Image (spheres, grey):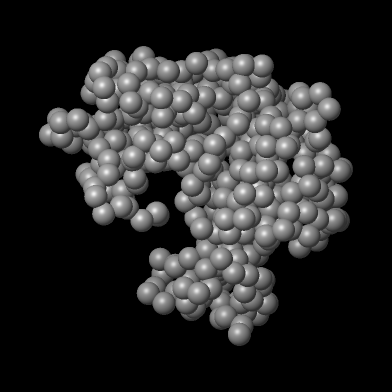
């Protein structure tokens, strides 16, 4: 966090729900707000402006937003002049409806409108009138051109390369709240990464709803593998990661990058969602179980040490016991390093919300428990394989595990805790792994 000036500035608290894209959106809003004199605080009770940056990918996340707003209502009544805003996917989805459910909210900013927050906040400050802006821009109307960003970490930073999605998977609300695919120009992206490198950033995470289709809608623009090659050349950047990849657009050229590019980390997040061809077809995913397994075979051939993670939905409408068993069998066959698993949640406006044979909550919960128990065994087994190994770790900062403990990540994206000092932050060090746990590793710094 940046140092707050001696004279008290206006303060902002941003609470972020959801994915890495949302975390980066919060960084973007903060950069704009700092130009208006707002500085971040760690407690919402100290804020003059509170922004709740939302996710609507699942119903539980959406309900959590309204619960959070309820907590802020009392503070809003006590603090004259406090501005309360809702941004992100729920804001895009609900629009004016948020003001009906929570009339104490001052601002509703959709997913594209966060780039106008520095124009809208002064209007609220002057007139105290409520503002709702949920306009989605087409490819021609808007390029994703960003001003300076203040990364939340001095070591690593997100870089948006594209937004939106054209896939319209049956369960997914993203195309409705993020709009159609539009890519930034490679020139802008390369310039941004060079600036981040000059500022001391060592690791970048490239973001997009489907990075594999980067550049396809811009005539003459390079594709995603070519972009990775260009970023790999930038001095100062030590590591490159990206998310998320769609299996149907995963090319051999991209797979080969894992064997050819020095800075591209050995970690691939490749959502499969289900191990059943029947369910994959109902989901509208555009690939089969066999195609997915072939992708895994190819990437492991190119990079045997790669860590592979995935997303899985259980309880999709019509999912039978046999379909679920096929998902479990796929998990056993692939042996993912970790998974993000969820119960199917019908989202308004999506095709899956209207499908027959909706699965009851009891069965969804049971299946999720079985799946997660299986994966926990696999994850721990794979983590134990790191014991005794020497790993390169990028030191990110102090660990929550102890006063003298520091934390970093391996190239395969595993968290490592070890004893160290503040002078190590931002450096690549070698750590000998002493013990493995379910969600992290413990090691000893090699001097």
Tell me the quarter of the picture where residue 325 sits.
top right
Tell me the quarter of the picture where residue 288 sits.
top right
Q: Position of residue 308 (x, y in %)?
A: 69, 52
Q: Residue at x 44, y 36 (%)?
A: 32
Q: Residue at x 65, y 47 (%)?
A: 193
Q: Position of residue 405 (x, y in %)?
A: 45, 74
Considering depth in this image, is 341 or 260 the residue closer to the camera? 260
Q: Residue at x 63, y 55 (%)?
A: 197
Q: Residue at x 34, y 18 (%)?
A: 131
Q: Position of residue 329 (x, y in %)?
A: 70, 47
Quadrant of the image for the C terminus? bottom right
* Left or right of residue 405: residue 295: right
Residue 338 in view (yes/no): no
* Left or right of residue 205: residue 85: left
Quadrant of the image for the N terminus? bottom left
Q: Position of residue 347 (x, y in %)?
A: 50, 23
Considering depth in this image, is 277 or 212 the residue closer to the camera? 212
* Left or right of residue 39: residue 239: right
Residue 285 in view (yes/no): yes
Considering depth in this image, is 393 or 41 the residue closer to the camera? 41
């Amino acid at each position: 966090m940046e140092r707050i000036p001696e004279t008290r500035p206006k303060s902002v608290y941003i609470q972020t729900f959801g994915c890495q894209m949302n975390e980066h959106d919060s960084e973007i809003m903060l950069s704009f707000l700092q130009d208006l004199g707002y500085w971040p605080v760690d407690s919402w009770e100290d804020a003059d402006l509170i922004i709740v940056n939302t996710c609507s990918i699942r119903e539980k996340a959406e309900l959590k937003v309204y619960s959070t707003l309820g907590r802020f209502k009392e503070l809003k009544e006590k603090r004259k002049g406090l501005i309360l805003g809702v941004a992100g996917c729920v804001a895009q989805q609900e629009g004016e409806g948020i003001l009906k459910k929570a009339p104490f909210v001052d601002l509703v900013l959709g997913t594209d409108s966060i780039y106008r927050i520095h124009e809208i906040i002064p209007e609220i400050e002057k007139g105290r009138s409520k503002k709702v802006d949920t306009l989605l821009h087409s490819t021609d109307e808007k390029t994703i051109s960003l001003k300076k960003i203040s990364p939340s970490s001095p070591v690593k930073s997100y870089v948006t390369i594209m937004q939106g999605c054209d896939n319209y998977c049956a369960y997914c609300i993203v195309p409705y709240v993020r709009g159609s695919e539009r890519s930034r120009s490679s020139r802008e992206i390369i310039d941004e990464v060079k600036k981040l490198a000059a500022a001391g950033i060592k690791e970048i995470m490239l973001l997009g709803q489907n990075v594999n289709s980067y550049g396809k809608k811009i005539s003459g623009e390079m594709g995603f593998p070519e972009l990775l090659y260009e970023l790999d050349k930038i001095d100062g950047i030590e590591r490159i990661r990206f998310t998320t990849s769609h299996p149907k657009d995963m090319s051999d050229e991209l797979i080969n990058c894992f064997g050819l590019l020095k800075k591209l980390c050995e970690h691939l997040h490749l959502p499969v969602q289900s191990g059943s061809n029947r369910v994959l077809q109902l989901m509208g995913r555009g690939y089969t179980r066999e195609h997915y397994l072939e992708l895994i075979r190819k990437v492991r051939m190119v990079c045997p040490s790669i860590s592979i993670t995935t997303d899985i939905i259980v309880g999709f409408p019509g999912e039978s016991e046999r379909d679920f068993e096929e998902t479990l069998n796929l998990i056993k066959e692939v042996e993912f390093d970790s998974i993000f698993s969820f119960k199917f949640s019908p989202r308004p406006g999506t095709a899956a919300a209207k499908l027959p044979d909706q699965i009851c909550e009891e069965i969804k919960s049971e299946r999720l428990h079985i799946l997660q128990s299986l994966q926990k065994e696999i994850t721990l087994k794979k983590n134990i394989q790191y014991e005794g190994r020497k790993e390169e770790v990028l030191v990110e900062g102090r660990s929550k595990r102890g006063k003298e403990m520091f934390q970093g990540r391996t190239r395969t994206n595993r968290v490592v805790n070890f004893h160290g000092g503040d002078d190590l932050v931002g450096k690549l060090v070698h750590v000998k792994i002493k013990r493995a746990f379910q969600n992290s590793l413990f090691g000893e710094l090699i001097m």
